[in-house]
Amino acid sequence: MDFVQLVVSGLANGCVYGLIALGFVLIYKATEAVNFAQGDFMMIGAFVCVGLTNAEYMGLSFWLAIPLAMLIMAALGYAFDWGVLRHMSGQSQTSIVILTIALGFILRFAAGTIWSHEPVSLETPFAGQDLRFNGIVLGIDEIAIIVVTVVLTALLFLFFSRTKLGVAMQAASQNQLAAYYMGIPVKRIQSMVWALSGAVAAVAGILFASKGAIDPSAGLLGIKAFAAAAIGGFGSLPGALIGGLIIGLVEPFSSRYGPPGVSQIAPYAILLLVLIFRPGGLFSQSQKKKV
Amino acid sequence: MSLLQIRNVTQRFGGVVAVNDVSMHVDEGEVFALVGPNGAGKSTIFNLLSRFYTPAGGSITFDGHDLMKLSPDQVPSLGVARTFQNIELFEQATVLQNLLVGRHRHRKTSVLAEAFFTRKVWEEERHHRHAAEQVIDFLNLQAYRDKLIAGLPYGVRKVVELGRALATEPKLLLLDEPASGLSVEETQDMAFWIEDIQKQMGITVLMVEHDMGLVSAVSDRVLALADGKELATGKPSEVQSHPAVIEAYLGTSGIAKGGTAPVRSTAEDAAQKTGDVA
């Protein structure tokens, strides 16, 4: 019985890691840059939703606050690419990495100033409710996280395989030069990828804040999500989700059955093992070059 | 009125003048070839046409539009498609998916309509699939339809790239060394396809090519370049026997030896390919 509860809570955590990792991979594939502020995007997304729906702030309906928060985060992602990164083209990867790290600090500071550094929890219609049967207690919030992640993944799959914009995003991330000459406005598409990854970060943040409290340093969770993306292979969207689930599952089990402290090390130990035995990640797309 | 008109175009890279005051025009329905030794400026002209570079001087008009006013992603919307010397495909996608990306400029549906999968979206999707399948049939790519590009041999990739350009339904097709790296049989297939593209599909072709056998077989007119300057324009046989062209290829001693056509084999061409960046 214990086992089922551990699996569900592990999967729920893993979904949040996986969604942040998805944001990493989306941006990496499209622009070859790593957005180290992805975890902070998640945190800001959560706070934006808190600001929209919590009674002490605007008190809007939770169901209205979700799309609004996604829209606001999408606009933030688009604006960052359009206003800052587009002027950095031709600069080295290092400058862009440092820029996103700096962006993370700015977002953390801004969130602390606006919403204070105290942990806040998101007021959801299903807060504190749980399902009980045969002695198993499952939080509705955890079930909701898993269901939302599955639905979002399916929608993203349809978006990338079926829509004009989704296909253009895939094309632009595989070969920019060729995409240009198929009539795809690559720069605008890259900004849209930033927008999409902002919206996904908002969902991750809302899910995270719905089952616990959020504070400005929650963005540091991004480091674990980065490990999840690396386990998945950093170029693969399903890989990012599965990497997140692996880390999410390992944590509760190692803390339940392992010696104290192991659960904190376990995600990174797995990352090391993957890097040693499959350096390209579990879902590596790179192939050996023909000579 | 010519389909493509290039007037007095000059392109510099630092102190190097890659294209020096070149003028040319391509008429609707013809196959036009650019030839010349490595570094002559052929690929630079292609990259100017694709708006990859902005020339230091001169004008380029296509089908009544000033190309200088467009960005690279707007050029295909006028009906200009191109292939690349070093093959630029979407590696992690199948042959069919590559061809479907070629349909991008013809996709008119909005994200909202796509979200509800309306009848219009459904019909348009069918139409694009059909167009891609026609290209697959035309180029005999049936066996590779659902294979990933990353695993395909060089010759097939070359054909897929031609197919993706055709899937855009261009008015003008720019082929950057269509025969480089191909075997003798593959080069013959390429020659037949270029003829069919011109005669059956009515598409104008502008190509850069070193293989003079292919150039003579398919071209209506040829422009020979050396060091960024025009040497001669005319029918393939005229250009091949033009003294300035022979000199550019073989040096002055070539005339003394009585050389006529500087025909190079495909194998030699492939060996030279790596050094040819201009």
Image (cartoon, coloured by chain):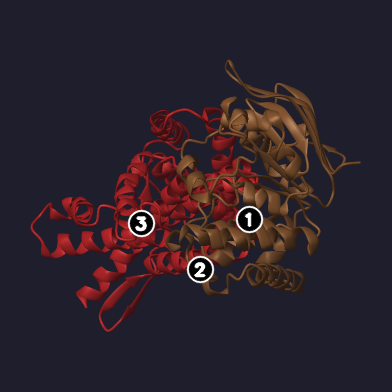
Chain colours: A red, B brown
SS category of the residue bearing label 2: helix
Q: Is residue A271 above or below residue A177?
A: below
**Relative horizontal placement of residue B46, taking residue A141 as reference (left or right):** right
The outermost residue toward the right is B1
Question: Is residue B39 something one can see in this rendering?
Answer: no
Nearer to us: label 3 or label 2: 3
- Image coordinates for residue B206, horizontal then vertical, percent: 72, 46
Q: Are marks 2 and 1 on the same chain?
A: yes
Q: Residue at x 78, y 48 (%)?
A: B220
Q: Are marks 1 and 3 on the same chain?
A: yes
First in residue order: circle 1 vs circle 3: 1
Chain letter of mark 3 equals A
- Image coordinates for residue B118, horizontal then vertical, percent: 73, 71
Q: Which mark is residue A165?
A: 1
Q: Which residue is mark 3?
A: A287
Q: Which residue is mark 2?
A: A154
The outermost residue toward the bottom is A134
Chain letter of mark 1 equals A
Q: Nearer the viewer, residue A113 or B9?
A: B9
SS category of the residue bearing label 1: helix
The outermost residue toward the front is B257
Quote the CA–CA distance across marks 3 and 2. Answer: 27 Å
Q: Residue at x 40, y 51 (%)?
A: A20
First in residue order: circle 2 vs circle 1: 2
Q: Nearer the viewer, residue B157 or A23?
A: B157
Quote the CA–CA distance across marks 2 and 1. Answer: 16 Å
Q: Is residue B91 above or below residue B139?
A: above
Q: Quadrant of the C terminus of chain B?
A: top right
Chain letter of mark 2 equals A
Quote the CA–CA distance across marks 1 and 3. Answer: 27 Å
